[in-house]
Image (tube, rainbow, N blue to C red):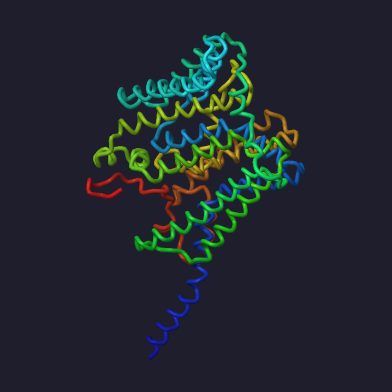
Amino acid sequence: MSATSTGTTTTSAEAVRRPSSQVLGLIARNLRQFGMVLVLILLLLFFQLQTGVALTPGNIINIIQGNAYVLILAVGMVLVIIAGHIDLSVGSVAAFVGVVVALLIQDGGLPWYLAALLGLVLGLVVGAWQGFWVAVVGIPAFIVTLAGMLLFRGLNQVFGKSTTIPVPDQIIYFGTASLPEVGPSTGFNNLTVLLGLAGVVVLVLAEVRKRRNARKLGAPIGPVWSSVVRIVLLGAAILFATYLFASAPVGRSFPIAGIILLILVIIYAFLAARTPLGRHVYAVGGNRAAAQLSGVNVRRVNFFVMMNMSFLAAVAAIVFIGRSTSSGPADGTGWELDAIAAVFIGGAAVSGGIGTVIAAVIGGLVIAVLNNGLQLLGVQADITQVIKGLVLLLAVALDVYNKSQGKPSILGFLQRGLRRSAGTGDVGPSDTVVPPADPSPPRSTSRQQ
C-alpha cells in the first residue's frame, strides 16, 4: 500500500510540474529562435528613448538604404561561412564591379541596364576564378580571397584611376528610390501597406504549414497558444515596421534597395532550407569527410558558395553606387568585415555547419542600428568602432562557450537557467540548435526530395 501511495504521489507531482516545465521549455526555444530579434528591438527602443528620433520613418528608411549593401553581402557570406570558409575579398570585388559599371556607362556609352547586367556577369566570372582555386586546386579560401582582396582593390584603382565616376539616374534609382505612390489617397503608401499585410499572411501560412508538416511526420508539436503568441508578436513587429515605412512623407516609403534585399532573402532562405544544394552546404560545413563519403560533391559546393558570394558582391556594388551616386576609390573598404560580423552576430558557428540567412540579416540590422544610434548620440567614430568590436567579440565568445556546454546558441545561457528552474536538467537533445533543414546529406538515391 505504501509503495503504491508513494508511486501515485510521485506521478501526481510530476504531472503538476510538467505544464510549467513545458511552458519554460517553449520560452527557452523561442529565446533561442528570436533572441537577435529581441536584441534588435531593445536597441531601437533604447536609442528612441535617448534620442527621440530612432524610430521615426525617415531614420528607419535611412538605416535600410544606408546598409542594404552590407545586408546583401551577409546573405552570401552566411553560405560561405556555413560551408566552413571565409571570404575577405567581397569589398574589393564590389569596388571593382562598381567602377567597371560606371565606366561602361560613362566612357563606353552602354545603356545602364546592359552595363548593370555586365557587372553581374563580371561578378560571376570573378567568383568562378576564386572558386576554381578553392574547389579545384584546393587552396584555402582565406588565402585565395586575401589575394583577391589585394588583386581587385588594385584593379579598382587601375581602372578608376583613383577618381570618382558618376552614374546615371537609373542606377541611382536602385540606391535611393522608394516604392511609388499608387491608388487612392489613404495617408499611407499603399504598396508598402500591401507589402506588410502580405508579410503577415506569409507568417501565418508558414506557421500553419510548419504544424501540419510536424503532425504528418509524427514530430512533437507545441501547444496552439505558443504558435498564436509567436504569430502575434512577430506580426505586431511587421505591422509596426509597415506603419513606419508607410507613414513617411510622400515620395519616401519602403526603399527599392530593401525590395532587392527582401527578394534575395526569400530566394536564399529557400535555397538553404529547402533544396538539396542547401542541405549539402550544411553537410560540407558540418563534416566535410562524412559529406564526401555520403556522395556529396564537395567541389561543386565550394565552387558554388565562392561564385555566389562574388555575384552578390556585384549586386551590392550596384546598390551602393546608386546610393552614393558615383563609384569612388574608397568603395568597399571594410565591407567584408561588416558582412562577416553580421553573420557571426546572427549566430553562425565559427567552425561552419550552423547559421541561417534570416539570422545573418538580423545580425546585420543589429550592427546597422548600433551604428545609427551611436551616431545619433554623437559618439565619435573611433569609440563606435571599439563598441562594435566588443559586441562582435562578446557574441562569438558566448557562442563558443555555450557550444562547449552542449548549447550551440548565443542565448544558451538564458535557456540553461530556465531549464534548471523547470527541473528538467541542463542539456538535452532538444537543446541543440540545428539548421532550418536537415544538414545531413542524402543517404540513398531513393530518398524523396
Question: Residue at 59% across / 54% down in the picture?
Answer: 235
Q: In this picture, is 381 found above or below 286?
A: above
Image quarter of the N terminus: bottom left
404 left or right of 413 in image? left
Question: Residue at 35% across / 45% down in the picture?
Answer: 439
Res. 413 in view = no
Q: How many marks?
A: 0
Q: In this picture, is 434 found above or below 229?
A: above
230 left or right of 294 in image? right
301 left or right of 169 in image? left
User: Is residue 248 or residue 6 the one in the foreground?
Assistant: 248
User: Is residue 370 or residue 222 the one in the foreground?
Assistant: 222
Q: In this picture, is 229 found above or below 307?
A: below
Question: Residue at 41% across / 42% down in the picture?
Answer: 272
Res. 399 in view = yes
| Residue situated furthest front in the rendering | 184
| Residue situated furthest bottom in the rendering | 1
Q: Position of residue 193 (x, y in %)?
A: 63, 47
On the image, which quarter does residue 165 sit in? top right
Q: In this picture, is 120 found above or below 45?
A: above
Q: Position of residue 129 (x, y in %)?
A: 38, 20
Q: Position of residue 402 (x, y in %)?
A: 48, 49
On the image, which quarter does residue 84 sit in? top left
Q: Position of residue 391 (x, y in %)?
A: 59, 39
On the image, which quarter does residue 135 sit in? top left
